[in-house]
Image: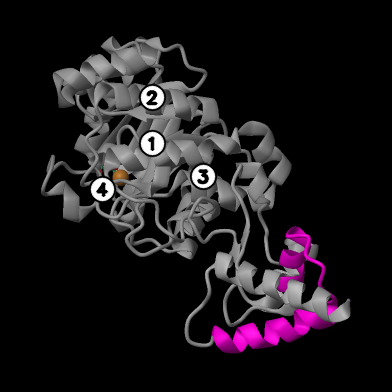
Amino acid sequence: FPKFYIVDTTLREGEQFSTADFTGSDRVYIAKSLDKLGVDYIEVVNPMASAQAREDCRRIKDLGLKAKVVVHTRCHMDDVRAAVETGADGVSMYMATSEALRKHSHGKGVDAVIESARQVISFVQDAGLEVRFSCEDTFRSDKSELLDIYAAVDALGVDRIGLADTVGVAHPFQVYETVRAVRSILKPSTGIEFHTHDDTGCCIANALVALQAGATHINTCVLGIGERNGITPLGGFLARMYTLDKDAVKGRYNLTMLRNLEQYVARCARVTIPFNNYITGAAAFTHKAGVHSKAVISDPGTYEVIDPQDFGVDRHIKIAHRLTGWNALRQRVQHLRLPITDEQVKVVTRLMKDAMETTPFTLEQMDEVLITASRNGSESSS
Ligand code: HCA
Ligand code: CU
């Protein structure tokens, strides 16, 4: 499977989420947790954003984390000077290349883009930092102009180039083709970082095909927060990669940290964790239909491709509802150590399914029925 690095940008893109205003201590806590989880890079906000941002970039760098700390900047001398001063390991700069965005930002043509990149990149290189150069709105940019820009910055010796689906419009084939085309003109040692928004629901699939086409680094955010409806979620991306190479993902990342980190970020970003969130959503490992429950009770692999234990989360088998089956009830009976025969369980199941046609029971109510049935059963047999 392609080797990949996670560049988590919760502390940059994530802060662009509508209700995310992290305090200095939130930033530090999130950086430490990301590092413990094992992400390879932590991208932080532009130090030019505010005095607090500058101070926090330094603080995060001074934590001495295993992850590399990279500062996100515009392709601009003022920004990269401030970035270098933070002591960070790298600078990730971006510049608009699509017609739509260019006219609202720098207004430059290809040659002028390359010219300004040249000066800024060599400043960062002279300071001994890693450099990544990304074309904003890659997938709405002219393909031949893109390739010219990437070839030119590659010749300057950047460590990575970036492709950014800023508006979340690219689909998997398009991502595959574009990354392939870019890969073919770069030096083999140059990394490719992929960043994608989720406006049209392709962000995880696109991250995967980008890797399959030769990308090396993927941008994620905890819970997928970011501008508008956000970017590739860290948890969902880990889920995707886990199913492809479970041992590698388990070996490299502390997966049991995910839930806590998400809860922390959810609190600071003032959101709740969606019911259908990858891995940690309330419903992610909840089984309901009788057929599913029966199978999962005897072998979880029947209806699960991820072992919830690897992420420290629990499986739930819902049994008090009209779609239940007698196997699920029998398991409950065994759990409660009630003396009922299988025949009795079948009878009780039928009665309960009818009774729950309109309103499901709570688990406690269902237990009551089972306990009563077991008493009646043992009385009638004695
Ligand atoms: C933004 C730009 C960006 C940059 C991505 C990158 C995008 O919203 O400020 O640096 O590769 O989505 O284009 O997040
Ligand atoms: Cu973005």
Give the amino acid at mark 2. Answer: Tyr
Which residue is labeled 1 in the image? 264
Give the amino acid at mark 1. Answer: Tyr
Res 186 seen here: no
Which residue is labeled 2 in the image? 29
Which of the 4 image quadrants contains residue 77? top left
Work out how far the residue at label 3 is from the one at label 2, CA to CA, in angstroms.
36 Å
Q: Position of residue 305 (x, y in %)?
A: 68, 58
Q: Earlier in the sequence, mark 4 or mark 2?
A: 2
Q: What is the residue that sits farthest to the right in this orientation?
A: 382
From the image, state whether disc 4 or disc 2 is nearer to you. 2
Q: Residue at x 67, y 61 (%)?
A: 304
Would the CB of label 3 be found within 8 Å of ligand 1?
Answer: no
From the image, state whether disc 3 or disc 4 is nearer to you. 4
Give the amino acid at mark 4. Answer: Glu
Work out how far the residue at label 3 is from the one at label 4, CA to CA, in angstroms.
27 Å
Kindly state the secondary structure of the residue where label 4 is placed. Answer: loop
Would the CB of label 1 be found within 8 Å of ligand 2?
Answer: no
Work out how far the residue at label 3 is from the one at label 1, CA to CA, in angstroms.
37 Å
Which residue is labeled 4 in the image? 227
Q: Position of residue 173 (x, y in %)?
A: 49, 64
Work out how far the residue at label 1 is from the one at label 4, CA to CA, in angstroms.
19 Å
Work out how far the residue at label 4 is from the one at label 2, CA to CA, in angstroms.
22 Å
Would the CB of label 4 be found within 8 Å of ligand 1?
Answer: yes
Give the amino acid at mark 3. Answer: Arg
The magenta region covers 329-356
In front of the other: 118 or 237: 237
In front of the other: 34 or 101: 34
From the image, state whether disc 3 or disc 1 is nearer to you. 1
Which residue is labeled 3 in the image? 183
In front of the other: 270 or 135: 270
Q: Evaluate if marks 2 and 1 touch, with contact meaning CB atoms under 8 Å apart.
A: yes
